[in-house]
Amino acid sequence: MHIYLIRHAHALDGEDDAARPLSPKGRKQIRSIAKLLREAEAFEAREIWHSPLRRAHETAGVLVKSLRCRARLKEVSGLKPEDAVDTIAEKLGDLRRPVAVVGHEPHLSALASLLVVGSASPVHFKMKKCAVLRLDRVGGGWSVRWHISPELF
């Protein structure tokens, strides 16, 4: 069992934070990451959870299209930047299939820290925009399999 934690790609600035769309740079970022994942056959999730914020939803949509996969997009509560990570950690703990989670900072770094180290604070990960962190379930916990950062492209 494994999960992918994905920070949304670069977005345009705007007064309404929830409505900020991806920028052209962000669309290019997620297409590049998707190409790498597709060519490496490194993405297996059939469901992609995303926050209700537009930039996360768009990142998930471009990812599915660029991967040419049939993953189902699902808006999930508890993925906003300021949300507590415990709820999502519980949902992930109950899963028996790979899932991708598209979200925001500081939420994703705190979630990764909670899953791997057992505590959301202090944060042990830094999720840059459009970064992907794969975690594998090992026994009763989670282990880092790999981490891709967009500056590689």
Image (cartoon, rainbow, N blue to C red):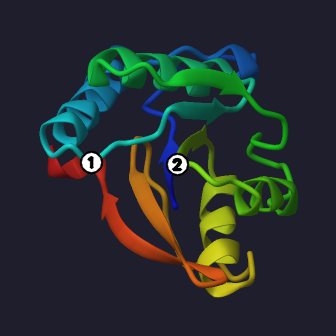
**Residue at 43 percent of width and 58 percent of height:** 133
Residue 98 tag number: 2
- State the residue lying farthest toward the front: 96
Identify the secondary structure beneath mark 2.
loop
Expressed as whole percent of the image width and height from the top left, the position of residue 8 reads 51, 35
Q: Amino acid at mark 1?
A: Ala
Q: Which residue is mark 1?
A: 42
The crowd level at tag 2 (other Cα within 10 Å; few <14, some 14-19, many 20+) is: some
Expressed as whole percent of the image width and height from the top left, the position of residue 36 reads 17, 40
Is residue 106 or residue 108 the one in the foreground? 108
Residue 51 tag number: none
The crowd level at tag 1 (other Cα within 10 Å; few <14, some 14-19, many 20+) is: few
Q: As drawn, is 57 to the left or to the right of 125?
A: right
Identify the secondary structure beneath mark 1.
loop
Expressed as whole percent of the image width and height from the top left, the position of residue 81 reads 74, 45
Q: Amino acid at mark 2?
A: Pro
Expressed as whole percent of the image width and height from the top left, the position of residue 137 reads 55, 72
Is residue 96 or residue 31 the one in the foreground? 96
**Residue at 48 percent of width and 25 percent of height:** 71
